[in-house]
Image: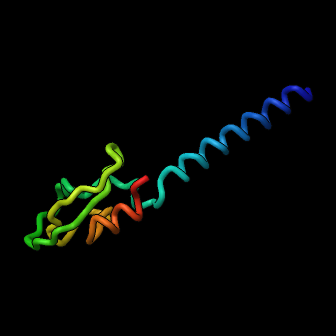
């Protein structure tokens, strides 16, 4: 019985460490959102706002033109802001 309890505690510790590692890997929750470069396909607006978004697959900030509406919070005014917030 003690061995089963010990194994259970070990499994819980491993799971908690794994979850903590995933949270630490992303500097900010915004950085885990899909990048905004391709838009969301629902709304097309006519503003022309040069912006930056973090692409987690390549760990880079890329420039795109934000139309002014829709999208998500993964959008920054400068490359420096994007990299400071998200880049590892």
Color theme of the render: rainbow
The outermost residue toward the front is 80
Q: Position of residue 53 (x, y in %)?
A: 28, 59
Looking at this view, is 54 or 70 the one in front? 54
* Residue at horizontal 7 percent and vertical 71 percent from the top: 46
Counting every numbered tag in the picture gives 0
Considering only vertical position in the picture, is 5 above or below 80? above
Q: Is residue 65 left or right of residue 52?
A: left
Q: Position of residue 48 (x, y in %)?
A: 10, 71
* Residue at horizontal 77 percent and vertical 35 percent from the top: 10
* Residue at horizontal 43 percent and vertical 52 percent from the top: 88
Q: Is residue 57 left or right of residue 63?
A: right
Q: Is residue 6 left or right of residue 80?
A: right
Considering only vertical position in the picture, is 27 above or below 10? below
Q: Position of residue 81 (x, y in %)?
A: 34, 68
Q: Position of residue 61 (x, y in %)?
A: 29, 56
- Quadrant in the picture for residue 33: bottom left
């Amino acid at each position: 019985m003690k061995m089963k309890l010990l194994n259970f505690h070990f499994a819980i510790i491993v799971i908690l460490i794994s979850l903590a590692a995933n949270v630490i890997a992303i500097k900010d929750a915004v950085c885990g959102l899909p990048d905004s470069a391709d838009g969301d396909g629902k709304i097309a607006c006519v503003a022309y706002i040069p912006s930056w978004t973090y692409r987690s697959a390549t760990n880079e900030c890329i420039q795109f033109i934000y139309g002014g509406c829709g999208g998500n919070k993964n959008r920054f005014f400068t490359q420096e802001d994007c990299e400071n917030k998200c880049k590892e």
